Amino acid sequence: MTQLNRRTFLKGVGTAMSLPLLEAMVPTAALGVSKAGAVAPTRMAFLFVPNGVNMAHWTPSEGGLGYKMPDTLAPLADLRDNFDILTGLTQQHAFANGDGPGDHARSTACFLTGVQPKKTSGADIHNGISADQVAAREIGKHTRFASLEIGCERGGQNGDCDSGYSCAYSSNISWRSENTPMAKEVNPRLVFERLFGNGNPGESRESRTRRDLFRRSILDFVLEDAETLKGQLGRHDQRKLDEYFTAIREIEERLVKFESNGAAAALANVKAPGGIPSTYGEHIRLMGDMMVLAFQADLTRVSTFMFANDGSNRSYHEIGVEEGHHDISHHGGNPDKLEKKKKIDTFHVEQLAYILKKMKSIKEGNSTLLDNTALIYGAGISDGNRHNHDDLPILLAGKAGGLQGGRHIIYKDYTPMNNLFISLLDRAGVRTDHLGDATGKLEGLF
């Protein structure tokens, strides 16, 4: 069986397709381990949800193992050994601290930085480098893309979006430098083309045009390379490659389906979705699949994913909630609004469960993609009515670096959330002396 380089690509017109981790890529003689025991890379993912949560249905009543699963987390019941709930973490610099209103903008900007963003709606924005970009500077050296920033709601990079705060703060959790946010991509087709394009704009356009014209798959453009490669692989690797190709083709079919629906709507003089799935749940799942594919093919090891911008007033028609999310989050103790907020929170967790199950289904030697990932899911606001940034709703999934799972870990109130980030970064081999307001590593994670 041929020894493959981990950076092997399948090439075609406008196409450069990375491969998942295969047994043929593992130099067993050098490692002294079985191919099935090969060490996969560590990935880091940061998933953000807006407007806080209904904390009464999020926080377990007991700490440690064996806690009763709260209603909002029920969609994750089959995965409880694969995640921890962390209570007591705070982003202190998302509070006003003398800067007045603007909690939604601050909660987003501060979520991964732990830095008080400068209150301005002009070009003189100032924040801090985010945890994902600290990771990208180090572990991003090994991949085609240092990091991947995706989301499901567009956002501006200038103008006033929240009480004197620039839209750049409200729209981005990823910051490459103090004044440079990493803008997210919300169009799944553009993410797909970026992941599997060869970097040549002209060839990429030709590839897309030919695929659209002749109803062909991107896999058709690498077919010759793929067939040659499969002839060099063992049966296990051939099966793994087939599974990977099936996942890519399934995503393509979903893209074509909603794009066709959009074209039909335009012909009927109905506003088309502009390349975005009309169903919010499908949009989240499709973007989540893109992130998983990028991890699986080792195109990147770091990703941020914003389900929506904080302050978003999106309606959730598909679950029967017609009012805007932001309006509902200001519940004022109203039982009806609290119940609707719980429904929205549960909907978000259902999408998280889909992503985690997809990651868990992908084998990497004796482990899974989820085992080799540290994924943080949470919000920059705790209770949307209070706009508080302490005791944040934070879930930590995966087993990377020795994470255990199955627990509700309760930390002292006002423990800096950046302590979590530097703990995870350290286990991923990224050494940093400080990050925002971090005071040290968290105990009991690993």
Image: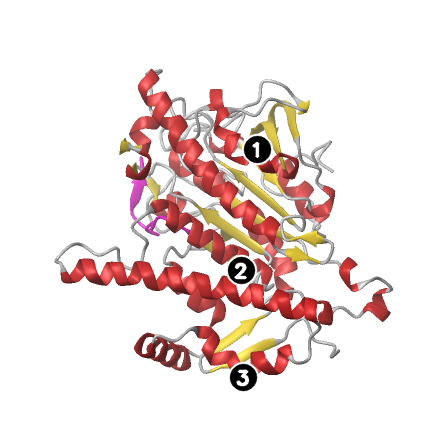
Q: Which residue is mark 1?
A: 77
Residue 77 as seen in the image, left or right of residue 269? right
Numbered mark located on residue 293 in the image: 2
Q: Residue at x 35, y 48 (%)?
A: 153
Q: Amino acid at mark 1?
A: Ala
Q: Inspect the image, locate mark 3, and give the three-letter code of the amino acid beneath it.
A: Glu
Write down the region rendered in magenta: 151-163
Q: N-terminal of the two: label 3 or label 1?
A: 1
| Most foreground residue, 263 or 121 | 263
Q: Position of residue 112 (x, y in %)?
A: 53, 43
Give yes or no for contact between labels 3 and 2 (Cβ–Cβ under 8 Å).
no
- Horizontal relation, residue 14 to residue 426: left or right: left
Question: What is the spatial separation of the Cα atoms under label 1 and label 2, in whole angstroms?
Answer: 24 Å
Q: Sequence-wise, which precedes: disc 1 or disc 2?
A: 1
Q: Estimate how packed mark 1 is, as few (under 14), some (14 to 19) or many (20 or more) residues with alpha carbons within 10 Å.
A: few
Residue holding disc 3: 224
Instruction: Look at the picture and state if 100 lies above or below 2.
Output: above
Q: Residue at x 33, y 79 (%)?
A: 214
Percent coordinates x, y for residue 119 in the rendering? 39, 39
Camera-nearest residue between 161 and 72: 72
Give the quadrant of the C terminus: top right
Amino acid bearing label 2: Leu
